[in-house]
Image: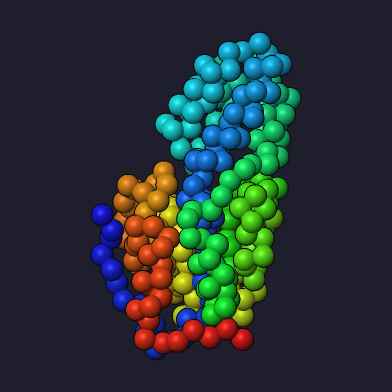
């Protein structure tokens, strides 16, 4: 069920820029995880005489329990398998981060971004290993869909979402201010708190692994939609027209 709809905080300010999260906002992150995990497990099974299916299932169980917030999934996997070493961990992480997936955006995302790009300045703000995120964006065919892309891992670790720094940086590159910017994401742990602190209007897409999570108001978005197609409804309720210069 969608969260209650709220009105824009600044109804008289024209919307100029829209910022997006990537995983589970524009594409199903689970598709990437399945493919990348399969590639990692093939490497481990071949070089350490492991049963592929059992190892793959184990890795998926760890991920589902710990979620993508957990930074030590491969550490746990290698320790449970009894093959942990710092060198093998590094190779496993490199295989995961360097994997080139075959993934597609959610239905309707490409034409939606094309249409929005004619009216608004568009930005993408994404956490995660920068090479991995670049591979995802390339596979999704979204490289040219945005006026700017912020890879938060290119900066100090303290500046990843929800630090306001990355949203402010994106808006500077788009020549926009918070009162004329919308941010669209899915993860209440990371996506909205920093943007809202700046005065950005936030939209939560109820998709992906965190769709059933409900947090304190400070961490939630101003409005929610059931899928990315619902963004059109949010934009059409605006009393002001878009400006892209």
Total number of numbered discs in the rendering? 0
Residue at figure coordinates x 54%, y 34% from the top left: 34
Corner quadrant of residue 92: top right
Could you tell me residue 143's position as x and y percent? 67, 60
Placement of the C terminus among the 4 image quadrants: bottom right
Residue at figure coordinates x 61%, y 80% from the top left: 175
Could you tell me residue 66's position as x and y percent? 45, 34
242 shown above or below 182: below
Corner quadrant of residue 90: top right
Q: Nearer the viewer, residue 172 or 164?
A: 172
7 shown above or below 153: below
Residue 236: in sight, yes or no?
yes
Q: Nearer the viewer, residue 233 or 40?
A: 233
Could you tell me residue 238's position as x and y percent? 37, 81
8 shown above or below 170: below
Residue 191: in sight, yes or no?
no
Residue at figure coordinates x 58%, y 46% from the top left: 103
Instruction: Residue lying at the far top in this picture: please name it.
Output: 49
Could you tell me residue 213's position as x and y percent? 34, 48
187 shown above or below 58: below
């Amino acid at each position: 069920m969608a969260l209650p709809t709220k009105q824009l905080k600044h109804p008289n300010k024209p919307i100029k820029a829209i910022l997006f999260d990537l995983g589970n906002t524009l594409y199903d992150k689970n598709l990437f995880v399945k493919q990348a995990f399969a590639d990692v497990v093939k490497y481990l099974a071949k070089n350490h005489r492991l049963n592929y299916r059992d190892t793959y299932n184990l890795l998926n169980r760890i991920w589902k329990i710990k979620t993508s917030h957990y930074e030590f999934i491969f550490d746990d996997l290698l320790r449970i398998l009894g093959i942990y070493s710092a060198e093998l961990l590094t190779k496993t992480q490199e295989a995961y981060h360097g994997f080139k997936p075959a993934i597609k955006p959610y239905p309707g995302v490409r034409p939606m971004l094309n249409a929005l790009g004619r009216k608004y300045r568009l930005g993408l703000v994404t956490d995660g290993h920068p090479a991995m995120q670049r591979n995802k964006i390339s596979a999704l065919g979204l490289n040219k869909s945005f006026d700017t892309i912020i890879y938060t891992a290119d900066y100090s670790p303290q500046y990843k979402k929800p630090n306001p720094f990355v949203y402010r940086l994106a808006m500077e590159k788009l020549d926009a201010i918070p009162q004329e910017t919308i941010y669209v994401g899915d993860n209440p742990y990371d996506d909205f708190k920093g943007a809202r602190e700046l005065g950005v209007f936030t939209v939560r897409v109820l998709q992906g692994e965190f769709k059933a999570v409900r947090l304190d108001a400070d961490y939630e978005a101003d409005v929610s939609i059931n899928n990315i197609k619902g963004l059109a409804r949010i934009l059409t309720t605006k009393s002001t027209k878009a400006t892209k210069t």
